[in-house]
Image (cartoon, helix red, strand yellow):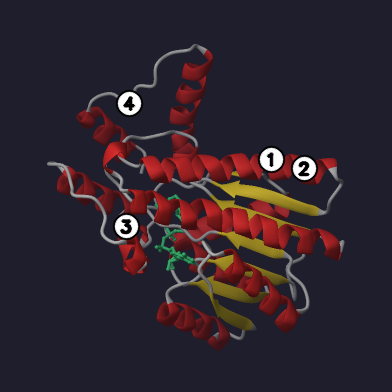
Amino acid sequence: MKEFRDKVAVVTGAASGIGNALAQGFARQGMKVVLADVETAALEKAALDLSACGAQTLAVRTDVSKAAEVEHLAQVALEAFGGIHIVCNNAGVAVSGPSWMHTTADWEWLLGVNLWGVIHGLRVFTPIMISQGVEGHIVNTASVAGMVAAPGMAAYNVSKFGVVALSETLHQELAAFGSLVRVSVLCPGFVSTNILDSARNRPAEFGDTAAKLPGADEMEQLARQLVAAGMPPNQVADIVLEAIRTERFYIFPHPEWKERIQARMEGILAERNPEMGSIDEVIGRLRGNR
Ligand SMILES: NC(=O)c1ccc[n+]([C@@H]2O[C@H](COP(=O)([O-])OP(=O)(O)OC[C@H]3O[C@@H](n4cnc5c(N)ncnc54)[C@H](O)[C@@H]3O)[C@@H](O)[C@H]2O)c1
């Protein structure tokens, strides 16, 4: 898609971080922007900020883990603006800790948002965009965690590998059907957002997360430093807009991670066991790959 002006973008997780930067980026291109999020106050503020800059916006409180809410989002977007041209299935949350210590609620909450959110988005928006018969683009936010499975984030890794697989499948299906709709999968490294405070939006029905292992606080501190020093979200948004224009499927804002991705893929083909090294080596590598 090369021409953005007066077209309609729908962004989930638009009240914060990468989603908010994408919404701003689309508004700057003259698009009408539908912002969806569960965090109502932040969502309304984000929409007001965009409107103050002259953009036509619509804020729709949406829990992407619920099919009916994503269907409602599409319906009100169509009623308000008459079409949908870009969809960013971006909302996401994080949980950390050894895989065997994730609770059932951790798995259900995280997969509900990060994986089912994208599944609902694909199921609801793709047929609408195909039926319009005009150019469109779907951007699914995965992560480098959809390409390399680092320890301590099993549910997150599973969700992001799932988003990469869904996106690759959809890309090939759309091409096979000769559709004008394109898809990209966004795989960032560290981005300076509120992702590590995801628990702020954890519904009460999912209860508390598991007890922490010794050393977990130090790991969390490190993760906070890496995220705080990460790429500014608006830089990620610029890279996404360019990828939409050039119809690029894989979006890697942090190319320094490609070495790890390559090592994993070569390891699989050579049938080597996965190996991240000691905790110190992992930390050193993470610091190098910010
Ligand atoms: N920040 C990073 O380092 C990083 C790296 C790679 C990928 N990502 C991915 O980027 C995406 C955006 O996250 P971010 O880093 O901007 O974090 P963020 O916390 O700043 O923004 C995420 C947004 O998603 C919203 N959200 C949470 N649950 C929701 C739900 N059920 N329905 C709708 N919205 C919901 C939150 O309210 C928030 O506004 C996520 O998918 C995340 O996994 C982030």
Q: Is residue 248 visible?
A: yes
Q: CA distance from mark 1 to mark 2?
A: 6 Å
Is label 4 or label 2 in front? Answer: 2
Residue on which disc 2 sits: 173
Q: Is residue 144 visible?
A: no
- The reply to whether dot 4 and dot 1 touch (C-beta < 8 Å) is no
- The reply to whether dot 1 and dot 2 touch (C-beta < 8 Å) is yes
Which label was assigned to residue 276?
Answer: 4
- Specify which label sits upstream in the sequence, 4 or 1: 1
- Specify which label sits upstream in the sequence, 4 or 2: 2
Is label 2 or label 3 in front? Answer: 2
Q: Which element is circle 4 on?
A: loop
Q: CA distance from mark 4 to mark 2?
A: 34 Å
Say above or below: 174 vs 274: below
Is label 1 or label 3 in front? Answer: 1
Toward the viewer: 5 or 148? 148
Q: Is mark 3 within 8 Å of ligand 1?
A: yes
Residue 200 placement (x, y as % from top left):
32, 68
- The reply to whether dot 2 and dot 3 touch (C-beta < 8 Å) is no
Residue on which disc 1 sits: 169
Residue 4 placement (x, y as % from top left):
73, 67
Q: Which amino acid lies under the numbered mark 1 shown in the image of this protein?
A: Thr
